[in-house]
Image (cartoon, coloured by chain):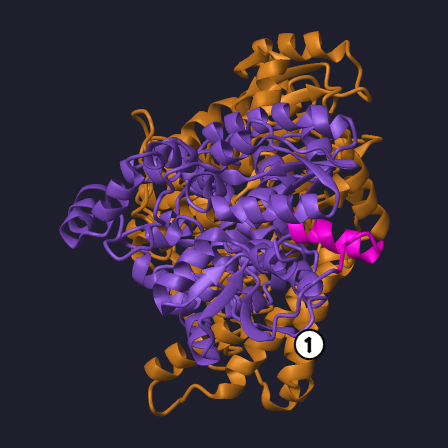
Chain colours: A purple, B orange
Amino acid sequence: MGHLEDSLDQCIKCNVCMTACPVAAVSPHFPGPKVVGPQAQRFRHADQPVPDASVDYCSGCRVCNEVCPAGVRIAELNARARAQLVAAQGQSLRNRIIARAGLVGRLSSGPHAPLLNMGLGLRPLRWVMEQVIQIHRDAPLPPASRHTFGHWFRQRGQRRGLRQVVYYHGCSTQYYEPWVGQAAVAVLEHNGFEVIVPDQDCCGLPLLSNGDFRSAERQHRYNVAQLIPYVRQGIPVVGTSTSCILTLKEEAPELLDLTSQEVADVAAHTYDIFEFLRTLAERNELKTDFRAISRTLPYHPPCQLRAHRIGLPALDVLSLIPGLRLVESQAACCGIAGTYGLKREKYALAMAVGAPLFQFVRESGSDLALCDSETCRWQISHATGVTTKHPIEILAAAYGL
Amino acid sequence: MQTISTDVLVIGGGATGSGALRDLAMRGIRAILVEKGDLTHGTTGRYHGLLHSGGRYVTKDPQSANECARENAILRRIMPHCIEDTSGFFVITPWDDPEYGDLFMANCRKTGVPVSELPLAEMRRREPALNPQIARAFEVADAAADSFLAAHTNVLAAREYGAQVLTYHTLIALLREGDQIVGAIVEDLRSGERKKIACAYVLNATGAWAGKVAALAGVKVTVLPGKGTLVAMNHRMVNTVINRCKLPSDGDIIVPVHSVAVIGTTDTFVPDPDFYGIEAEEVQFMLDEGEKLVPGFKQYRALRAWAGVRPLYKDQDVTNDRDLSRTYKLLDHAQRDGVEGMISLVGGKWTTYRLMAEDAVNVIAQRLGNTKPCRTAEETMPTPPFERRSVTIATEDGPTLHWLGKPLAAVEQTQAYNDLICECELVTRSRLQEAMASGASNIDDLRRMVRVGMGPCQGGWCVYRSSALLYEERSAKADPHTPFHIEYANAALLHFLQERWRGLIPVLWGDQLRQARLDELIFAGLLGIHRLRDHARQGGGLVTPE
């Protein structure tokens, strides 16, 4: 007992997940979490073909897990079934590309990034991409950065502090949004921390959600090997990419059945950055020398943050800033779910899933929205035209950093 | 009273009776089968669903072992859609005598039961949930069988050869003229109408009820009804039949069959095969034994418990009922009791039903002057219309057996997710309609045909849907003079819920208790089921005893 598959026993067929699932609500292709999760699982066999390709329409947003009153690990059952499908049938070229966020980022960022970004802005090129590799022509692809976050950090060097903390930046900060990492470093250093940025690979989440468990395991093992020396010294690991952090904490060990002490130790000492900052605040160790920001901003807590089951730490910490008011979206999901909404056959579905959120952001009248997850930020900006930032950027601004 | 003439009257619609009916019909002998309930209503529908390799009997009952081994190969060929090739392990746990392993292998070889020792690493790879302390493992040709489908398959084949079947017909009397049985009086439970069946021969294939039937002919047959309690677990923690490698005893086998895993069984003498309960200790004992094979077994969700009554024939004094032979006995009452025209078939097991039928029909055919040979081992049987036929899995050449994912593959193929009446067992509207057209007399019959209501929710979500569908189908087809009233469907609903409830009571803890509470909220809280009794009555061709 204790395996994910065993959690199917807890399903009482109550349909709560069926009514909450944002994908089933808008798509005839997805029969719903109960149906492809605990219900279908009884008919799957490790040594037989997975009978239902429909499970691939699960976006992995984990809203089902969040609402399930019985504790069934629905999203994980689906992820495993997809992995079994992929193991048997192979992976499409498109999924092989988009699941390798680290590789794509490495190839995209650099001196040629402006040229590449311009190319990705050209309709005919996007049309060709859609035809050839099945990435939807309108899907939000982030512009790559000329300089990586790592490059910036090495240039300025590690600065000494009273206490140490490891920063896990993930691929988006490294290759697309280095300013998020810069804000994080600034906030941590302002609070007296010495920030360490060890070598790191992609967390493996895009691989996990595209069913390539074997490659994901390689990346996770690499990251654990990089992080464990610090964890053993009692140095915590924090990250701004909440989905990467969730992967290190929980998703990778569980889905891949990794039970070593190293994996468990890294998982136990890794925190979402606002989770970490909130703990500091609770101990009165967080500096509160904030400038007032008299604004009301829409805030979307992404699915992957809610999956941490830590409440809404960004909301808690930012509430310390005088004048700032955040309005929570209450929307289930933005639809993108990492790489899901990029796919040609799923783009429209992802946009439909996010519609209530987009309406909320538009109706706020604000020209700025906040969200902890990068792909969600790109999706919100793409759908609404409203600039979307990581909450750490606001916190850095409030500190005057 | 209507009189029907035939050559042979077969009493009992279990595996043996339906197998014999087919054999008779294939030899051109006119035959009618009567069954007081639905097909497989007795023991056939209440066993664990094991197609024996013979391994369980190699030491104590070599003849049975050999019969099982031979029949196992035949049944895979003639009814592949009823069998899932799970394979079977015999494992030596720390609670078993390690010496028995070598004896087991030797006895398998002696009795013709194919066996091979399995490296433990291979055993763990194939069944990671098994107890890591298992010392040795042997692989045999066990498989999982659908005994409901098999009986329907035999009956369908028999009908194609001209046989008749009367279900829900109870035996009132056997007609005896001097020392000759000449027929029977049966009563149609749906209408109360009595019929006379005149025949040259009666085949008593009623298993644990054989003594009761024989008594109607004034003949004494002692069958010890041995109650075997079984518990179905919500999902398959193993995909292989797992046996303890020791002399057969209680709670020593787990059979993965369809979407569940069944652990069995006990063996307790009960005075009457129609009245017995399931004791809490029996269920507890079985779960404890399961724990020895699969650590954590007790944590899995138990779906329901039920019992079947084994037909063990006693013609000598045996102290332990488990020592009674599992092989069958053909009782020729002409030789044994001086009563002509009747044979009783007792003992035996599902796996050997065809062989038992062959032996019995050989005797009857000879008496009737029919010299055609038995062909039941050669001809592949047709698949009943309510069974899914289209979804196959790539296998090496040979018959396409049932596979676990087949029901899901069928739903996926037709994208019938929104048309599921029973969600747990993936039963679509059209399959239920087929089953209704095939003559189901209540929802419990539908369950035996298509597994509606057999899953984790035990009918919570499908019973009211099935009842509505039953009403729609029956009322649409009813002739205007005898309309099908809603009260009949209501009675079917109540009857089925009651049947499910009986099996739930022994396992009401944990997840299943939570489920029962939700089901109760649906039926009692939301739908006001307590008021339905006033709007329910039997009729319309349905049999729904209170």
Say if the magenta span includes residue A349. no
Q: Nearer the viewer, residue B463 or B513?
A: B513
Q: Secondary structure at mark 1?
A: helix
Where does the C terminus of chain B fall, quadrant-wise? Answer: bottom right
Residue A102 seen in the current view: yes
Residue A292 versus residue B339 in the image, above or below? below
Query: What residue sits 30% from the left and 55% below the top?
Result: A139
Residue designated by label 1: B521
Give the chain of mark 1.
B
Number of residues whose C-alpha sits closer than 10 Å to that of mark 1, classed few (under 14), some (14–19) or many (20 or more): some
Say if the magenta span includes residue A273. yes
Residue A185 versus residue A330 in the image, above or below? above
Give x and y (percent) for residue B69: 52, 22
Q: Is residue A30 left or right of residue A139?
A: right
Give x and y (percent) for residue A267: 68, 37
Q: Nearer the viewer, residue B157 or A55?
A: A55
Residue A60 seen in the current view: no
Q: Which stretch is magenta?
A: A272-288
Query: What residue sits 62% from the left and 21% below the top?
Result: B124
Give x and y (percent) for residue A143: 34, 48
Query: What residue sits 36% from the left and 92% below the top?
Result: B481
Give x and y (percent) for residue B78: 37, 35
Q: Quarter of the image holding residue A255?
A: top right
At label 1, which amino acid type do we have? Leu
Q: Is residue A345 left or right of residue B252?
A: left
Residue B1 versus residue B395 in the image, above or below? below
Residue at the farthest left position: A124
